[in-house]
Image (cartoon, rainbow, N blue to C red):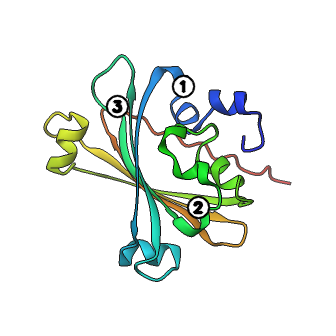
């Protein structure tokens, strides 16, 4: 998908792949800010605390619904992504092909994506942000992307309402010889 045409990427981004819906069915909200890495986030990236990061806050919903599908925060090392000024402009979101394509514009090839998913009760703030009914659980998704050298190049935390998501995992096994 990273090397597909822009038209193909616009039709098949992360949201479309994850949900099976078209781009025009979603409304996206994005906020960008820069700031120093906290100790826990710096540790994930393997950089000193205080290293400047680009923090991207995302919210998405179906255009015909008022409640969000997800909310989350993504972090990138600012020195790395500032080499392509287009990556610093939230008006370019949703980016065709998502973060993997963004990183490819910098010559970074993502080799591994790890998604650590837990289920928990939402915080009071998440109940308000996501329009949750009392007792509704959420999926907390912590995603780490590593390049071909094993370096973490993106880290994100997303919250998905349990009443609006279905997680399906398929593992293709090698044939016995």
Outermost residue, top direction?
64
Which residue is at 64% across, 40% downward?
97
Task: Tell me the residue that label 3 is attached to.
Answer: 164
- Is 152 placed above or below 29 here? below
Label 1 close to label 3 by CB (< 8 Å) = no
Left or right relative to 123: residue 140 = right
Q: Position of residue 146 (x, y in %)?
A: 62, 65
Nearer the N terminus, badge 1 or badge 3?
1
Whether residue 21 is visible, yes or no, is no
Outermost residue, right direction?
177
Which residue is at 68% across, 33% downward?
9
Where's the N terminus, which quadrant? Answer: top right
Q: Mark 2: give few (<14), some (14-19) or many (20+) Cα within 10 Å.
A: some
Q: Position of residue 73 (x, y in %)?
A: 39, 53
Task: Tell me the residue that label 2 is attached to.
Answer: 82
Q: Position of residue 43 (x, y in %)?
A: 45, 78
Decide which of 112, 47 is in the foreground and name it: 47
Q: Secondary structure at mark 2?
A: loop
- Measure the C-alpha gap from mark 1 to mark 3: 17 Å
């Amino acid at each position: 998908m990273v090397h597909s045409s822009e038209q193909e990427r616009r039709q098949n981004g992360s949201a479309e792949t994850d949900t099976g819906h078209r781009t025009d069915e979603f409304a996206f909200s994005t906020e960008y800010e820069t700031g120093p890495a906290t100790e826990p986030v710096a540790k994930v990236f393997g950089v000193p605390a205080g290293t400047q990061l680009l923090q991207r806050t995302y919210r998405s919903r179906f255009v015909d619904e008022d409640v969000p599908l997800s909310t989350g925060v993504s972090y990138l090392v600012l020195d790395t992504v500032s080499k392509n000024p287009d990556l610093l402009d939230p008006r370019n979101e949703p980016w065709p092909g998502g973060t993997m394509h963004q990183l490819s514009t910098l010559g970074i090839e993502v080799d591994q994506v790890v998604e650590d998913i837990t289920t928990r009760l939402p915080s009071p703030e998440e109940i308000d942000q996501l329009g949750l009914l009392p007792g509704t659980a959420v999926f907390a998704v912590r995603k780490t992307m590593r390049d071909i050298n094993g370096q973490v190049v993106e880290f994100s935390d997303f919250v998905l309402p349990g009443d609006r998501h279905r997680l399906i995992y398929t593992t293709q096994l090698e044939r016995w010889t």
